[in-house]
Image: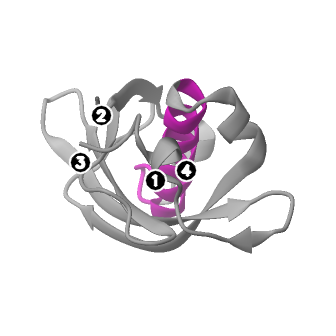
Amino acid sequence: MASSYTCSITATPEHIDVLGHVNNAVWVQWMEQVATEHWTRDADPAHVDAYVWVVTRHEIDYRGNVTEGQTVEARTWIGAPPRGARFDRLMEFTGPDGKVKVAAKSTWAIVEKASGRIMRVPPEVAAPFVP
């Protein structure tokens, strides 16, 4: 059964840019944080020990602003099975007004830690995450 992961993140002063809202680079950091939390929560611990994921592409739609002190609800999920070494992770950050502030699709590739090489995603690694 496929899983999704949800968490809350509150914007603090170091997240805010000169325009008074969360900086675009911070959204990317949050995307990595949320994806990593999802992986470590739902993957087999042996898989967490053996593999690491790297981003090969981000597509991000910025739809609204979040200011200091506001909390967003982050949700991530995998929409389709992997293609070779890669899969697309979807993510939405919803603001306190209930509107999606940032939506993203990131392509991740699996790397075997021992060899440092990209490899085909093993079916047993993908199983907890794919529909």
Residue at 44% across / 49% down in the picture? 22
Magenta span of residues: 19-41
Label 1, on which residue? 27
Helix, strand or loop at label 4? It is helix
Viewer-closest of 70 and 40: 40
Of the residues under marks 3 and 1, which one precedes in the sequence? 1
Which amino acid type is marked by label 1?
Trp
Disc 1 from disc 2: Cα separation: 25 Å
The numbered mark, 2 or 3, whose residue comes first in the sequence reads 2
Residue 8 numbered mark, or none: none
Percent of width and height locating residue 42: 50, 27
Q: Which residue is drawn at 22% across and 27% down?
A: 96
Which of marks 4 and 3 precedes in the sequence?
Answer: 4
Mark nearer the viewer, 3 or 4: 4
Q: Earlier in the sequence, mark 1 or mark 2?
A: 2
Q: Mark 1: which secondary structure?
A: helix
Q: How far apart are marks 2 and 3 (CA)?
A: 25 Å
Question: Residue tagged by mark 4?
Answer: 32
Hey, what amino acid is under mark 2? Answer: Ala
Q: Residue 85, position in %: x, y?
A: 51, 70
